[in-house]
Image (cartoon, coloured by chain):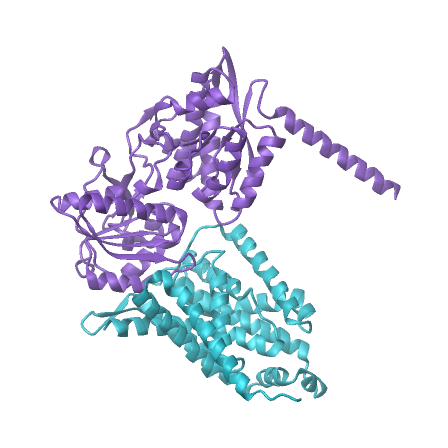
Chain colours: A cyan, B purple
Amino acid sequence: MIALQASLDGILLGILFALIAYGMALQWGVMNIINIAQGDLVILGGYIAYFMYLSGIHPAWGVIVSPIIMYFVGIGIYKLVINKVVDRDLFISILATFGISILFMQLMNFAFGADVVLANSGYGTTMLFDNSVVLPNSKIFSAFISIIFAIGLVIYMKKSKLGRAIRATAQNARAAKILGVDTEKVYAATFGINAALCGVAGALISITFTIHPYMGLPYTIRSFMIVIVAGLGNLPGVAMSGMGLGMFEEFADYILGTEFRIGSVFLLLVLILVYRRFKLSKKREYLK
Amino acid sequence: MKIKNIIITFVSAIALLLSTSAVSFAKVVGDKIVLGAAISLTGKYSSNGVHTQNGYNMAVDRINEMGGVKVGGKTYKFEIIYYDDESNPKRAAQLAERLISQDKVEFMLGPYSSGLTKAIAPVTEKYGVPMVEANGASRSLFTKGYKYLFAVLAPANLYLDVAIRTAVELNGGKGVRIAQAFEQDAFSQDVRLGILDAAKETGSEIIIDDKLPKELNDMAATLVKVKQMKPDVLVVSGHTKGALTAIRQIAEMKVDVPMLAMTHCDAAKLSKQHGKNSQYALCASQWHKTLTYKDDFFKDGMTYAADFQKLFDYDPPYQSAESSAALLVFKDAFERANSFDQKKVRDALAATNMQTFYGNIKFAEGGQNVDKPMVLFQVMCDSAGKCENKVVAPLKWASAELIHPIPKWSDR
């Protein structure tokens, strides 16, 4: 039963992380930018839901309002900063987004205060197997919404014109440009979509966990790891590695103790990277 | 080019003027005693930093209004130079240097949080500047042999000591089974050491001992263990985030535990953010307005709370009360020393033995206040869902009876 509880907790948590990671993978793949400010966008999205909650609107509506606002925030960031670093090397983009991250943290702290806040959904709890497995409905709701958004995005990417343009740009920006794709627009839209995904995730996090202006970095790191494990442009991989990491975390927490939770996740990351290198080096051929 | 030169000269002249005037009004000049303080006005501690500053300011105004400080037959007024330390220990230490060596401040008030106090204490100690601090409770502050550091608050290891002792008492003097989860920072780990001591003395057993990482806001795994092992007491300390997360997940996972003891409940505005779900939680507090300590300046806790409410439009958290108390201690020490000599003031501080609205104050060798026990309050809600914090232990100050054990979720 405990194994089941830990697995379910981990899976629900992992799905939420996977949504954030998906956004990161998308814009990493398309624009070759590692967005350190990813987590801060999530937190900002969370504050939007929180303020809706404060003004008497149910925070679940944040799932719709937050991505709309965040989409424009994303476009704004792109126009101000990202479009100047998009063709430069990875290091420049990391520095730029790191700067955005610090700026966002301070601005949120300035605007919303340093208190830890949360939005209460009042969703109650689901008990399974004679009360031995307990699942907060807010977590189930989060996972459900995350899946809907992920599926929606996949379909959008496949069917819509912009989606095709984004995929074309990801494959070969130059070729796409020659064939008439306005890559500038594609980049802006990609960053906007990523920010909107962060907005959804943020709203869900304000319902399930807590938010605070300085809490963004863990989400960046987690999504970074998920993307590294899954690889770019591999959505099922992102979902699987998100859930896998979530489960692994919960089990590590339960078996080894909470203090080893993050450590064991990093250990796993190292193992995966070493394994990948090992596999790659087997394939590598040298010209002599 | 000429205009630029003129502007530069003008600006530097003003800067020079400002810097010299800063020196001239610092330390004890005319009828003013100037105290220095680095406070977190921005950054992650800014809410509590503001509580601290409000407490200081309120006490300064009150003492000045009521005749100021009498030294050598002359009356002096308090004044405080504030700098914003941005919640950053390095910055706090720099600012302490600056206050002492540039602004020539001879007496300091503490910053907010144990971490920042730890950063500043070596500096004040180096220059022999007496510092009365009100917001650094970490035990390690008091074991370093600092001679110029005085804290009006009880050290961190005593925060939840009362809870364990109360649980043992309710268990007929027999030891209890404790589950605990603490964040891995200096303060929370000190609280943990206090629990370990209390457990040892009372013959209690610690069955779950989790350490929560700083960035974590999910403690589901710990709670699964709690559900399974059914301890008598669950202790959680992880600042406001820990308190909020614990209540949220305990309510969501319907974890039944006879006693739940925490820190940082009022900073987290538990009862406001969680309403009825926070009911029955026991919270450690340095102070509560219903305590019956008295002094001449603020009268008692209730009056202090009412006056504070009038000035700042919110109920004073204990961080404000203890900060106000720090100035009462300084005033008392100056008058007893009857001098502004730093050594004499330091000795007078060390000999402090007084009562303030906030509690009795008497410093041990290490500088911690040993004459003021912690109090425990319990969140109690009426049927309309309005929640209030009521002191339940120690019995001497209790304004309500402890509800124990906590009713099961299925019966609520």
Q: Residue furthest right?
A: B2
Q: Position of residue A87 (x, y in %)?
A: 69, 74
> Residue furthest toward the left?
B172
Query: Is residue B183 toward the left or the right of residue A134 in the image?
Result: right
Q: Is residue A175 left or right of residue B154?
A: right
Identify the residue at horizontal 37%, vertical 29% (top origin).
B365
| Left or right of residue B143, residue B258 in this image | left
| Residue furthest front in the image | A288
* Residue located 11% across and 45% down the image: B172
Residue at (50, 64) in percent of width and height = A39
Q: Is B116 rendered above or below residue B245?
A: above
Which residue is painted at 63% across and 63% down in the image?
A95
Q: Is residue A58 visible?
A: no
Split into 4 quadrants, where in the image is the N terminus of chain A? bottom left
Pick out the residue farthest to the top.
Answer: B73
**Number of residue marks:** 0
Residue B356 in the image, given as x and y percentages of width and height: 35, 26
Q: Is residue B398 left or right of residue A114?
A: left
Percent position of residue A28, x then y: 58, 75
Quarter of the image for the C terminus of chain A: give it: bottom right
Residue B318 figure quarter: top left
List x then y, in percent, for residue B61.
48, 26
Residue closer to the observer: B190 or A238: B190
Q: Is residue B206 visible?
A: yes
